[in-house]
């Protein structure tokens, strides 16, 4: 089949083009995007479409990037097509967004395309992802760890609301009165067919040398791993694509079942929280529980693109058997918390306020009974958004005013008095503690928590820093008298709680 007929068939099968509307075409200048633009240019009369060329210069490749932009502008002029070219400082955005440069470029590119589409009244944004890109995407998700949503790969048409974009682009999508889709007319076309088409038509293209740079994960898959896999199965590319098509159908079925169950299981929904009927939830198959939990996260955090496996599985375990008050941390400061007959997935601050612990939103908490600590070193707290960093420092390095009062997230201790065998645990019946400034008097941990107005629902979450012989610190409050830094201290332990980075993986 001629490539034009093949692409026309893909467009018709998946309804990728709305006749009579403007289509934004993302063009980098490489063979894939030039081929796409040429095919759509030949089809524009058939669909009564208005094509608009779009190119984003990422500010990464210097003179080559400037030449790419000039090439695309000239190409659009030669084919009598309108063109918009903009520039973004992607390295600066990567630092600002705390992303890898490759991912920041992707977010910046799609956000630019969304903004342009909104300005021009377009309904589709066409990009040149092809069958070999699909192979690489599926393999990449498999290696990094993914559920069905990732293993099904890219879809021929994707709502732009499903993509990770910057805040401005998401605001635009929320205010649009029409849907906006990302469409991939070449998704079923192998790279070899694209290259043959470009050569047959004598099309000029640009070459991006960064595609050879194997420091990029996708390039390593393309140039190193896939050739090795082809020695095991010469048809591995088609096998991966076929698997993705099957998994896409499975995913669609689960999504339909989840949408039906949602109405039965969800009792309340707002922008801050989604409440589920606990008994009905626990009666669902685990595949639907998993899909429902992911859906709740997407509804509460629409820009979030990737959800770590560990977040979902930890929360599923807690919700399956946890008691009233049990909590599990989820991405971007979301919590799942069990009530008496329901559980809520909510913004962290909202959830803590609902249990009377709103004042503790910025205090560390434990989700497990005990955690041994690395001294010195860093320890991630399982199921909690917090981590602990401990370092040994000399007494003279003590910061000014460091001992003036209790600090919710850090404290200093005399190393000789405390030792290096430390752990965090929750309270136990009969726990007693001698806080600094109590003139040698011990008090029960329960009494201290009551005096400090810690809500009863929160008391089993408060971390206690302990040595083999004593409670050293009730985290967020005072340190122990015996553990304090004094004039005779030579070395100190600096214990500091910080929030885990959002992309921290706790590998199974």
Image (cartoon, helix red, strand yellow):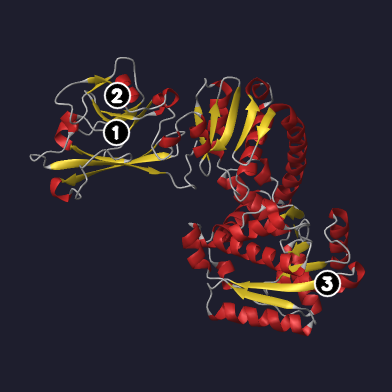
Q: Secondary structure at mark 2?
A: helix
Q: Residues within 10 Å of mark 2 (few under 14, many from 20)?
A: some
Which of pointers 1 and 3 lies earlier in the amino acid sequence?
Answer: 3
In terms of image quadrants, where is residue 48? bottom right
Which residue, given by chain and number where applicable, does mark 2 sit on? 448
Residue that protrudes farthest toward the top in the picture: 430
Q: Nearer the viewer, mark 1 or mark 3?
A: 1
Decide if residue 65 is in sight here.
Answer: yes
Asked if the residue at tag 1 contacts the one at tag 2, i.e. Cβ–Cβ closer than 8 Å, the answer is: yes
Q: Find residue 50 and name its label.
A: 3
In terms of image quadrants, where is residue 176? bottom right
Query: Would residue 159 appear left or right of 466 to someone viewing this image?
Result: right
CA gap between label 3 and label 2 equals 71 Å
CA gap between label 2 and label 1 equals 10 Å
- Is 69 in front, or is 35? 69
CA gap between label 1 and label 3 equals 65 Å
Q: Secondary structure at mark 3?
A: strand
The image position of residue 254, as x and y in percent, is: 74, 35
115 shown above or below 311: below
Which residue, given by chain and number where applicable, does mark 1 sit on? 477
Q: Secondary structure at mark 1?
A: loop
Query: Would residue 61 appear left or right of 280 to someone viewing this image?
Result: left
Residue that protrudes farthest toward the right in the picture: 46
Q: Residue at x 24, y 20 (%)?
A: 443
The image position of residue 249, as x and y in percent, is: 78, 41
Which of pointers 2 and 1 lies earlier in the amino acid sequence?
Answer: 2
Q: Quadrant of the N terminus?
A: bottom right
């Amino acid at each position: 089949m001629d490539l034009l007929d093949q692409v026309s068939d893909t467009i018709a099968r998946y309804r990728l083009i709305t006749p009579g509307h403007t289509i934004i075409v993302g063009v980098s200048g490489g063979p894939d995007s030039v081929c796409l633009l040429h095919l759509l240019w030949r089809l524009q009369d058939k669909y009564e479409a208005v094509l608009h060329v779009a190119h984003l210069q990422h500010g990464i490749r210097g003179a080559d990037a400037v030449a790419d932009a000039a090439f695309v502008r000239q190409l659009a002029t030669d084919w009598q097509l309108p063109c918009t070219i903009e520039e973004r400082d992607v390295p600066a955005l990567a630092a600002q967004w705390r992303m890898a440069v490759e991912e920041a470029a992707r977010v910046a590119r799609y956000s630019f395309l969304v903004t342009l589409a909104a300005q021009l009244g377009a309904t589709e944004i066409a990009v040149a992802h092809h069958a070999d890109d699909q192979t690489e995407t599926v393999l990449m998700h498999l290696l990094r760890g993914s559920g069905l949503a990732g293993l099904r790969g890219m879809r021929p048409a994707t709502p732009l609301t499903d993509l990770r974009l910057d805040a401005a682009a998401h605001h635009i999508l929320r205010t649009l009165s029409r849907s906006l889709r990302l469409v991939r007319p070449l998704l079923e076309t192998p790279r070899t067919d694209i290259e043959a088409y470009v050569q047959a038509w004598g099309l000029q293209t640009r070459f991006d040398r960064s595609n050879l740079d194997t420091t990029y994960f996708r390039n390593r898959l393309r140039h190193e791993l896939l050739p090795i896999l082809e020695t095991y199965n010469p048809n591995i590319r088609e096998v991966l694509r076929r698997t993705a098509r099957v998994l896409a159908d499975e995913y669609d079925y689960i999504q339909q079942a989840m949408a039906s169950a949602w109405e039965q299981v969800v009792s309340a929904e707002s922008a801050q929280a989604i409440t589920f009927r606990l008994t009905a939830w626990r009666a669902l198959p685990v595949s639907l529980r998993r899909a429902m939990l992911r859906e709740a996260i997407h509804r509460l955090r629409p820009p979030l693109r990737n959800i770590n496996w560990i977040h979902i599985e930890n929360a599923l375990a807690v919700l399956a058997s946890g008691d009233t008050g049990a909590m599990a941390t989820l991405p971007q400061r979301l919590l799942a918390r069990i009530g008496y007959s329901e559980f809520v997935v909510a913004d962290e601050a909202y959830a803590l306020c609902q249990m009377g612990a709103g004042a503790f939103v910025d205090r560390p908490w434990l989700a497990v009974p005990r955690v041994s600590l690395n001294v010195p070193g860093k320890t991630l707290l399982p199921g909690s958004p917090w981590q602990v960093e401990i370092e040994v420092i000399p007494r003279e390095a003590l910061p000014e005013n460091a001992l003036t009062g209790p600090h919710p997230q850090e404290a200093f201790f005399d190393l000789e008095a405390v030792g290096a065998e430390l752990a965090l645990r929750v309270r136990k019946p009969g726990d007693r503690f001698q806080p600094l400034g109590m003139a040698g008097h011990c008090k029960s941990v329960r009494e201290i928590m009551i005096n400090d107005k810690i809500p009863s629902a929160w008391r089993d979450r408060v971390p206690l820093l302990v040595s083999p012989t004593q409670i050293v610190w009730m985290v967020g409050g005072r340190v122990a008298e015996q553990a304090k830094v004094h004039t005779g201290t030579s070395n100190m332990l600096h214990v500091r709680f910080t929030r885990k980075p959002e992309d921290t993986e706790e590998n199974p």
